[in-house]
Structure formats: structure tokens, C-alpha cells
Image (cartoon, grey):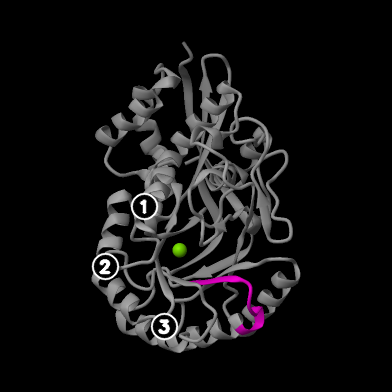
Amino acid sequence: MLTIKRIEAIAVSLPMAKPMKMAGVEIRAADNLLVRVEASDGTVGWGEAASAPHMTGETVESMVAAVRYLVPALEGRALADLHAITEHWTFALYGNHAAKSAVEMALQDITAKVAGVPAWQLFGAQRRDRMAVLWLIGTGSTNGDVAEARARKAAGFVAYKIKVGTGEAVEDARRSAAICDVLGPGNLISSDANQGYTVEQALAYVDVVKNAALDFFEQPVRSKDLAGMAQVAAASRILIGADEGLHGLDDIQRHHDMKAASGVSLKTIKLGGMREVFDAGVLCAQLRLRVNLANKVAESSIGIAGVLHLAAALPGLDWGLSITNQYLADDIVARPIRVVEGHAEVPGGIGLGVEVDEAKVARYRREL
Ligand SMILES: [Mg+2]
């Protein structure tokens, strides 16, 4: 019987290629948790979770502490008991979804490696193997954003997310419309306020962009304000998406029932693991909600691989894929996942399909 021999929580700080501005935060380095799990036969699996305190309530320090709290109940358990393990930690430790997601990803990686299959096969059939990737536009100025849009379009990108909620709503809306005009038809274009607006500001924004080629507008107002989300959605010609408001399948159902969103952004750190994200994707298909699948800004190729395997298997992916190692100055695997002409492919091989460079992990490791 294969068992979990050792679980290690590793804090890393990965350098960004350049700072990324979004509402309420400027990201200069990716402070992430890596989890390394070793099975009794020596097989090693890896998982990753970005710290996003405003989204999950977790810091790198708290994630490391949460994993260490869970470890005694996990080491020595049979790998085949993955479902029972995650049932147990839901009961034993409230919340901490990002920390749990990194452990779960590592356990899925090992499970797939031991079975000799790619990770997507743990979830069902492969529905897609090459996906359009959203490029984030958030330089801090209209001119900078327009130039960035032109450059990325020339590089082959066909999907975008414009960061708004950082300035005045009408100005943000004019900037969004200008970017849509530059990109032209045939693209998936979204904007994301990261909860940065009041309901009044969000209403002003959707009014100005009503004739722009925006496919969806994400999390205009505070995560808990579902009535406000519904008010904006009712007034908007652009479809509204929920992101920070989702921490479990119940939240997805609630947004649907209150007409607070037409689609959702799914992340392993919010929902607690790859299995939860896949189950959320199934629920979204039943509720006819659009799906965007995303990493947090920014994650290494480990977290990216987790999301790519989910993208391969999810029932729907109408709102595209946001993968974020493209914003890092360096990566920690032997062959980083590349976005080529705006598209990414599901890694081949078994497990997550990435080979972690432990020397790189040591270089970016932070002792807490
Ligand atoms: Mg978002």
C-alpha cells in the first residue's frame, strides 16, 4: 500500500518581470506556497498556491502554518484515500483553501504519476489540449495599456483582461473602450475591477462601456455585496462575472440564484483544490454559467500545470484561461510552460507533467 511519507511546506518569493497594478494592490513579487509530497515508494508530487490575502484571507506565513497543522493527520495515510483525506481536513480545519489546494494538487500529481497517467485523466475525458490565454493589461496609463494591447495582439494573443477599479470609473471605462477599439473584433475581452467600485461607480462604468466589445466585466463591487452585483448585472449590457465572491460551490449557486453573475472565475486557491474546481465546473455547466479558469498573479509552472490539466477536462471554458507564469522573471521547473502566440498546451507526460528544479526552489525559498 502506497502511503504519504513526508509533506513539506516551502515559502518562495518569485520575481515579477514587472510590477502589476490592480485595485488595492501592486504586485512586485509572487509570494507563494509550494508543497512537496513524497510517497513511500519515493514518488514526489508538487503543488502550489499563491498568497492572495484579499481573496482567501491567507498569507504565505499562514499557509505554511496551516499545512504544518494538517501534516500529522496526513503522513502515513494511504494515497488511495485522497477523498477521505480532503473530507477530513474540511472538518478539521475551517477555511484555509489556498493552503489545502497546494497539498491537494501535490497529492493529485502523485496519484496520477503512480497511475502512470496525465493529471487531467483523474477528472475524466480530455475535452481540449490547446487553449487561448488571457493577457492582463494593467500598465497604469491609457497610453501604456493601448501600446501593450497592440503589442500583444501582434504577438498572437486573442484574449485579454483589462485591470480597472484603480482609478475613476468613467476614466477606467473610457480606457477600457479605447483598448477594445484597438484590439478590434474576434477577441475575448474582459475587464476586472477586483471589487474596486461602489455600486454607483460600477453603474457609471457599465454605462460608458455599453457599446464596447467587452465580453464580461469581473467583480465590480465588494465580494459580499450580491445585491449590488445583481443591481449592476441588471443594468449592464456587458455580462458580469464573479471572482472574489466565490469560496465554494454554495457561493456559485447563490450568485446564480440572485442573478448576481452570468459567469465565474474558478481558482484552486479559492475553492480548495483541483477536485473542487472540477466539481465547480460541472455545477456551472448545470447552471449555464460561463467559466473562466485562472491562476492568481503570479504562479510558477507548477500551479500553471494544475490549471492546464483542469482546463483539459472542464465541461465549459467560455471565458478563457488566465495563466500567470508569463508575468514572472524566472520559473522553477526544467521546461517552463510557455504561452506561444497567445495559446498554451496541456503538458504531456504523467502527473502534472512538470519537472521541478529543486535548485531553483532553494534559490527563491524564504525562511519565515
Ligand atoms: Mg479577478
Q: Which mark is residue 286?
A: 1
Where residue 30 appears, x then y in whole percent? 55, 53
Looking at the image, which residue is at 54% across and 38% down? 125
Residue 59 appears in view: no
The magenta segment is 181-191
Q: Secondary structure at mark 1?
A: helix
Label 3 or label 1, whichever comes before in sequence order: 3
Q: Is residue 142 magenta?
A: no
Where residue 305 appears, x then y in whole percent? 59, 43
Where is residue 239, by image quadrant?
Answer: bottom left
Per the image, the residue denoted by label 2 is: 226
Is 115 located above or below residue 90 in the figure? Answer: above
Per the image, the residue denoted by label 3 is: 206
Where is residue 55, by image quadrant?
Answer: bottom left
Looking at the image, which residue is at 31% across and 72% down? 229
Where residue 317 appears, x then y in whole percent? 51, 56
Residue extending farthest to the top is 1
